[in-house]
Amino acid sequence: MNGKIKCTKTYRYTTFGDHKNADFLIYVLHGYGQLAPYFIRKFHGLPSNYFVIAPEGMHRFYLNDSSGRVGASWMTKEEREDDISDNLCWLSSLHDEITARKSFKKVFILGFSQGGATAARWYQSGKISADHLMIWASVYPPDLEPNNEIQLHEKEHFFFVGTNDEFYNAAQQNDLLSFYSSKGYKTVHFEGKHDIDLTELINVLMLLT
């Protein structure tokens, strides 16, 4: 017989920027096997009026065998509903704590690769009032219907994918671009790999702020 018990867990997040003087808040959710302190470095070139927060997935593991480099994951197929619930709980608690100290002109959520699904779930949960959702090189959660197009057009959302993404071939990229476009997302198909392209991100952010 299987059982479950609730217990407090300590979650980690990393920040970059001047919280007190920043105008904009952006959450960046990492991909599979990444860690927040390293993933956030990809955003160090953002303008100084952005405060960046990189939450970390709750499941850490060794990337190779049983020692060496460590990565983190947001969830697996095992007990996924519990992990989804726990993710939404702690991310929303984090947002409540951050915004209790200061309000921002705009709030962005960016989810990269595996983090894209968690970002989409968080946005659609209603537990955070974000202005823009950015899904980067990620399939939308198949069991989650994107918010209706009217809301998407009121709050511009974006999908990014690189032309040389090693996880999606050309046909798969086109399928993703068509899917997101059909749901009201603005799409960015840039020259690059399965990674954050800071120049492309800044170009979009400048249009929104």
Image: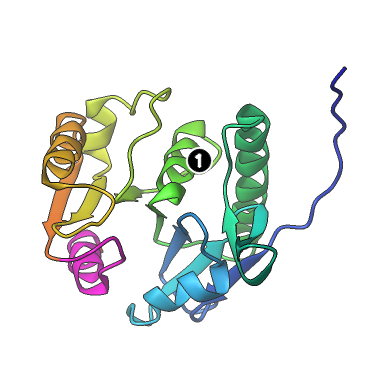
Residue nearest the observer in this picture, 20 or 178: 178
Tag count: 1
Residue extent of the magenta highlight:
192-208
Q: Position of residue 182 (x, y in %)?
A: 15, 29
- Looking at the image, residue 185 lies above or below residue 19: above
Residue nearest the observer in this picture, 168 or 5: 168
**Is 170 on the left or on the right of 92, as rendered?**
left
| Residue sitting at x 64%, y 32% | 78
Q: Which residue is mark 1?
A: 122
The quadrant of the image that shows the N terminus is: top right
Magenta highlight: main SS: helix
Residue 201 on the magenta segment: yes
| Residue sitting at x 68%, y 39% | 86
The quadrant of the image that shows the C terminus is: bottom left
| Residue sitting at x 18%, y 66% | 192
**Is 195 on the left or on the right of 11, as rendered?**
left
Q: Where, by quadrant of the figure, is residue 20 drawn?
A: bottom right
Q: Position of residue 29 (x, y in %)?
A: 47, 56
Q: Position of residue 80 (x, y in %)?
A: 61, 31
Residue 119 on the magenta segment: no
Residue nearest the observer in this picture, 160 or 185: 160
Q: What amino acid type should be assigned to the residue bearing mark 1?
A: Trp
| Residue sitting at x 40%, y 46% | 116
Q: Position of residue 26 (x, y in %)?
A: 43, 62
